[in-house]
Image (spheres, rainbow, N blue to C red):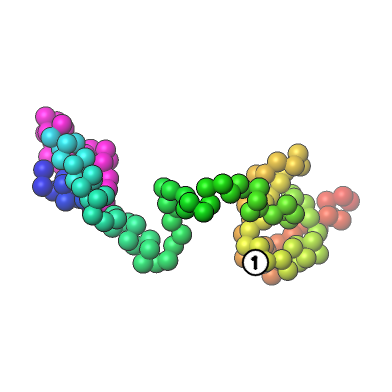
């Protein structure tokens, strides 16, 4: 029980930790006490501090979404902060077009299929590597 409580307090895991502890002890009759211990530990841990994983994300300055929105932003909609001019990459584009969009300050571009639906995102650095390594299809060879 102590091991489950300590791990749950650090990691904030619940069900997966209970399964790991049950497999380790091979005692299915400990399920309810282990779950109560884990839920108590997670609840008490949330009162005092953040999990070890949240601390690691903060230490590395990685972005982390919070569970709440700041009061000054509660009325803000996505339409107000999004750009209306979206640069996209279609299945077949010219190298000149790619060079033009790489001049823009965006880090990724939506990729569209022939029907105009988004099928993924293309990072800017990936486009640069493709151009530097001359990975394009010669359309003259395809049409002849």
Q: Which residues lie in the magenta part?
A: 10-32
Residue sitting at 24 percent across and 50 percent down?
Answer: 47
- Crowdedness of circle 1 by 10 Å Cα count: few (<14), some, many (20+)? few
From the viewer's perspective, is 124 left or right of 21?
right
Residue 108 rendering spot, x and y as whole percentages: 63, 58
Q: Which residue corresponds to the image point at 83% horizontal and 51% vertical from the top-left?
A: 142
Q: Which residue is the extreme one toward the top?
A: 29
Specify the principal SS of the magenta part.
helix
Q: In terms of image quadrants, where is residue 59?
A: bottom left
Label 1: state its secondary structure: helix
Q: Residue furthest front?
A: 72
Q: Front-most of 81 and 94?
A: 81
The residue at 63%/54% (across/down) is 81
Give the position of the N terminus as an image quadrant: top left
Does 139 sit above or below residue 13? below
What x and y, as percent, mark residue 92? 77, 52
Name above or below for residue 47 compared with residue 127: above
Which residue is at the front of the view, 41 or 19? 41
Based on the picture, tell me whether residue 15 belongs to the magenta stretch. Answer: yes
Determine which residue is flagged by label 1: 129
Asked if residue 2 is positioned above or below residue 123 in the image, the reply reads: above
Residue 98 visible, this orientation:
yes
- Is 52 left or right of 110, judged from the image as shown? left
The answer to whether residue 23 is visible is no
**Residue 44 within the magenta-colored segment of the rendering:** no
Q: Residue at x 74, y 63 (%)?
A: 101
For the image, the number of numbered tags is: 1
């Amino acid at each position: 029980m102590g091991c489950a409580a300590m791990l749950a307090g650090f990691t904030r895991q619940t069900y997966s930790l209970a399964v790991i502890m049950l497999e380790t002890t091979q005692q299915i009759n400990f399920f309810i006490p282990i779950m109560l211990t884990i839920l108590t530990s997670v609840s008490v841990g949330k009162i005092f501090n953040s999990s070890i994983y949240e601390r690691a994300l903060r230490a590395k300055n990685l972005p982390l979404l919070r569970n709440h929105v700041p009061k000054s932003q509660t009325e803000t909609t996505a339409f107000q902060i999004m750009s209306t001019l979206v640069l996209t990459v279609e299945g077949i584009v010219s190298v000149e077009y790619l060079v033009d969009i790489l001049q823009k300050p965006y880090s990724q571009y939506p990729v569209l299929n022939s029907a105009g639906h988004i099928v993924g995102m293309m990072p800017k650095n990936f486009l640069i590597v493709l151009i530097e390594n001359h990975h394009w299809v010669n359309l003259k060879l395809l049409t002849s």
